Image (cartoon, grey):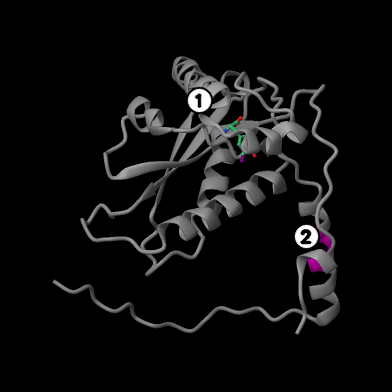
Amino acid sequence: MPAEEYAHIALKYNELEPDVMRERATLFAELMQRRRSVRHFSDRPVPQDLIEKAILTAGTAPSGAHREPWHFVAVNDSALKVQIRVAAEREEREAYTRRMSKEWLEALVPLGTDWHKPFLETAPWLVVCFAKNVGDDGRKNYYVQESCGIACGLFIAALHNMGLVTLTHTPSPMRFLGEILQRPKHERPYVLFPVGYPDPDATVPDLHRKNIAQLVTWL
Ligand code: IYR
């Protein structure tokens, strides 16, 4: 049976004065410039309602045919976090010592990462985004990778905006997440985000971002 068309309603659009646009654009760009991927977490608890707000924000992402091809699992349970750390480190150790190419390992040298993932136990929350190639109604989803990528970007921005830190972690392969978290077969783990407060002694690599000339070609 074909799906029915949505009713079309008037757009709620709030036009801003140009100086207000500029002020807000500047503040948001400055806020986002301060975002860093963090690998050293404090074990300070974070209330569930904050995680919920970030997931609701992620869920505002545009998606192919508005199929919303994502599902988030938010893990606060210590035993589950230990299980995830053990399984992730098993895969990562294998990846770093055998599976990753010399070229790949060299690309990671500036970041100083290795197979140890203590943050999977320390961070109060592990949030996993699962990508769904098929919806719960059995119909196919479209642009699943793109849609989930955008949703995860909004999730990261929402966390940063509320003063929490995270890391886009993709242990490879990460099938084990579907098993530990008991997700159905048609859901594929997309990204794992440890979320929390930074460790007071957290450090980050002193990296720099592309400037505007490097970022854009104006035609
Ligand atoms: N998944 C591994 C390796 C890794 C890969 C990339 I590309 C990074 O930007 C960072 C790490 C890990 O998490 O260590």
Question: In the shown orientation, is residue 62 left or right of residue 159?
Answer: left
What residue does disc 2 label? 28
Residue 207 location (% of width, % of height): 83, 42
**x and y percent of residue 178 in the render?**
35, 33
Q: Position of residue 120 (x, y in %)?
A: 57, 23
Residue 19, image quadrant = bottom right
The answer to whether 213 appears left or right of 119 in the picture is right
Magenta-colored stretch includes residue 28: yes
- Which quadrant contains ligand 1? top right
Residue corresponding to mark 1: 76
Q: Which amino acid does label 2 sit on?
A: Phe
* Residue drawn at x 76%, y 46% as measured from the top left: 35
Q: In this view, does 163 lie above or below 210?
A: above
> Which quadrant would the N terminus be assigned to in this image?
bottom left
Q: Residue at x 62, y 29 (%)?
A: 46
Q: Quadrant of the C terminus?
A: bottom right
Which stretch appears magenta? 24-29
Q: Main secondary structure of the magenta part?
A: helix
